[in-house]
Image: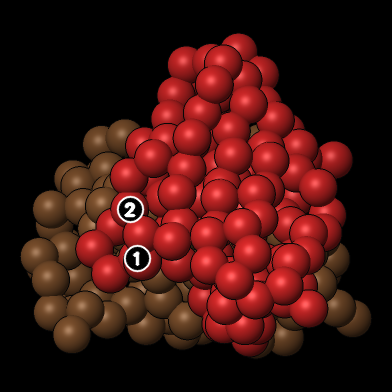
Amino acid sequence: EVQLVESGGGLVQPGGSLRLSCAASKFTFSNYWMTWVRQAPGKGLEWVANINQDGSKIYYVDSVKGRFTISRDNAQKSLYLQMNSLRGEDTGVYYCARAVAAAESFWGQGTLVTVSS
Amino acid sequence: QSVLTQPPSASGTPGQRVTISCSGSSSNFGSNPVNWFQQLPGTAPKLLIYSNDQRPSGVPDRFSGSKSGTSASLAISGLQSEDEADYFCAAWDNSLNALVFGGGTKLTVL
């Protein structure tokens, strides 16, 4: 069964850093665009970043540009999100997703990031 | 303030047909297909409709999508209690170079 398992979330102070990971299994990871989407507590979905199959095309939402970096390691079948200069508004559940808006879309269960002093 | 506009809530009784609307603009719906996601309480979102009206494998045909110009709709026929969830529309926006979501519609089955 296809799996995406996020990890690396937790409590961090404003201005701090976290690195999220998403481990993929039971599918050919290198064939797919991958995406991070977040959801603030009690709020809607917000797309964060996309990366294509070989990492040559990357897109970010304006609010994280210059602070977050999406990357992938196809050999390790893993997706990453390096988050620096964290703010309170970055608090939420972070989901990784395969082919987010295509027939083979699949989402992980998410990891909670809390930015607070 | 979301780029795509959805009603915050909708409701229906079991067996009824309900529709959820989503309004966009020329830079998103006018140029790109619409997608719909379902988020059951306490769970991760799941793709329900892609490319305006296509259902991924496993999604019941009670769910259907349509798009006309800069508006889209999700229809659910034969409403069931397990359809109670949040529903989000989404599309790529060429001006923002971003995937944009609607604010979500909370569907209550009465």
Q: Give the x, y percent position of residue A31.
A: 13, 53
Place residue A25 in its image quadrant: bottom left
Q: Which mark is residue B59?
A: 1
Does residue B59 lie above or below A30 as drawn?
Answer: below
- Identify the chain drawn in brown: A
Residues at circles 2 and 1 in contact by the CB criterion of under 8 Å: yes
Left or right of A34? Residue A48 is right
Chain B, which colour?
red
Residue indicated by mark 2: B55
Residue at the (49%, 35%) spot, across then down:
B66
Q: Secondary structure at mark 1?
A: loop
Q: Chain of mark 1?
A: B
Relative side of A36 to B105, left or right = left
Between the residue at mark 2 and the residue at mark 1, the CA separation in whole angstroms equals 6 Å
The vertical placement of B48 against A18, above or below, is: above
- Picture residue at 70% right of the left edge, 30% below the top: B23
Secondary structure of the residue carrying numbered label 2: loop
How many marks the image carries: the answer is 2
- Residue A83 lies, with reference to residue B4, above or below; the image says below
